[in-house]
Amino acid sequence: MNDTSIDHTAPKVITRARGWWYFLLLALTNLIWAAQGTAVKYLDPFLGPIAITFLPFYITTLLLIPILVWQRMRNPNRVRPGWSDWWKFAMAGIGGQVLAQLGMTWGISLSLASNGAILSLLIPVISAVLASLMLGERLTALRTVCLGLGLVGVSLMSVADFEHSAFTQRSYMIGNLLIVLGCCGSAFYNVYCKGLLARFGEVEILIFSYITASLASLPLLIWAEPRGKDTADITSIATGLAQMDASAWLAFGFLAVFMYGVSMLLFFYVLEYLPVTVASASLYLLPIFGVLLATNVLDEQLGALSLVGATIVLASTVLIMRYDTTS
């Protein structure tokens, strides 16, 4: 059998036209990610945090399996994962997805949403550091400046979060630590999977890492979730699912199809051509889309500082996508 692994690690020169295309794909990805919080709010009255996190995740895994089988049938000579590969997928799934999802979900439940919003700004920075250490990516002056500008922009957009945050209160310390661990898990997953692209395609990486993450999270769902939901009229996951209305099911479908499926495939596709540091800089677009969604869906007011911060974030993202042309 031929080893038809794909070499995604060779240096690539990205034209400006392609750079704009990747920017649009990353913008769409971040728009989907920004809508996660709204979807979770629709599900929160019916399910606990672990079920909200992993039940759609399991559906995504099942939906992706036929795509993987179809790809394998079209190209039966594609490399098959060995035990060492499955260990790497377990590292990505457990150390990345499980840690990221549980860290953020449990962390915010034990802390404040404002603390979570601020601490999540660390993800692009952590990603840049891990990419430098694990993949040998160069942290160029342009990338450093753009990351710094993005951080300044999202800080201006998060003034209200800073005013309501409580990092030093002991009651929130555990929650804040879990949020930081979740940020580290998210950054680790993106960087580690970039390395796996040298041997496997994006669908393969996603499905294999999701399988390991699903298996690892099942015990938590079975033993922790029924006792973790303190709403008196919901006694089990099955009862919660039965009580869900149309809006909740739409939110559930959005998480399963778009949040864990489409958005991650788009992000991994871009990672084939862009360094992790460059792609991760687009995560600063999340607050922009979050503010726009809150303004249009929840009728929240958009302040002057938010407008200035959004402009800076957009400028820094366009700058790195336009002028950082090599990977």
Image (cartoon, rainbow, N blue to C red):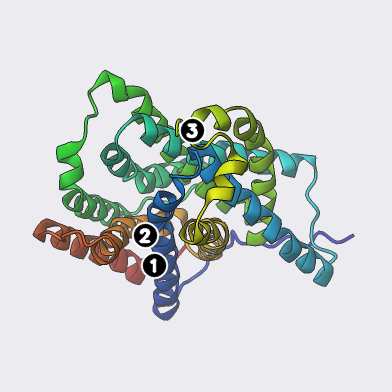
Of labels 2 and 3, earlier in sequence is 3
Say the numbered circle drawn on residue 79: none
Q: CA distance from mark 2 to mark 3?
A: 34 Å
Of labels 3 and 1, earlier in sequence is 1
Residue toward you, 209 or 196: 209
Q: Position of residue 239 (x, y in %)?
A: 59, 42
Q: CA distance from mark 1 to mark 2?
A: 7 Å
Q: CA distance from mark 3 to mark 1?
A: 34 Å
Task: Inspect the image, locate mark 3, and give the three-letter code of the amino acid beneath it.
Answer: Lys
Q: Which residue is mark 1?
A: 27
Residue drawn at x 52%, y 68% is 12
Q: How many residues crowd mark 2 within 10 Å: few (<14), some (14–19), many (20+)?
A: many
Q: Residue furthest right?
A: 1
Judge whether residue 55 can be spotted in this image. Answer: yes
Q: Is residue 210 above or below residue 28?
A: above
Task: Inspect the image, locate mark 2, and give the three-letter code of the amino acid beneath it.
Answer: Ser
Task: Inspect the image, locate mark 1, and give the three-letter code of the amino acid beneath it.
Answer: Ala
Q: Which residue is mark 3?
A: 229
Q: Is residue 63 left or right of residue 46?
A: right
Q: Quadrant of the N terminus?
A: bottom right
Say the numbered circle drawn on residue 282: 2
Element marked by disc 1: helix
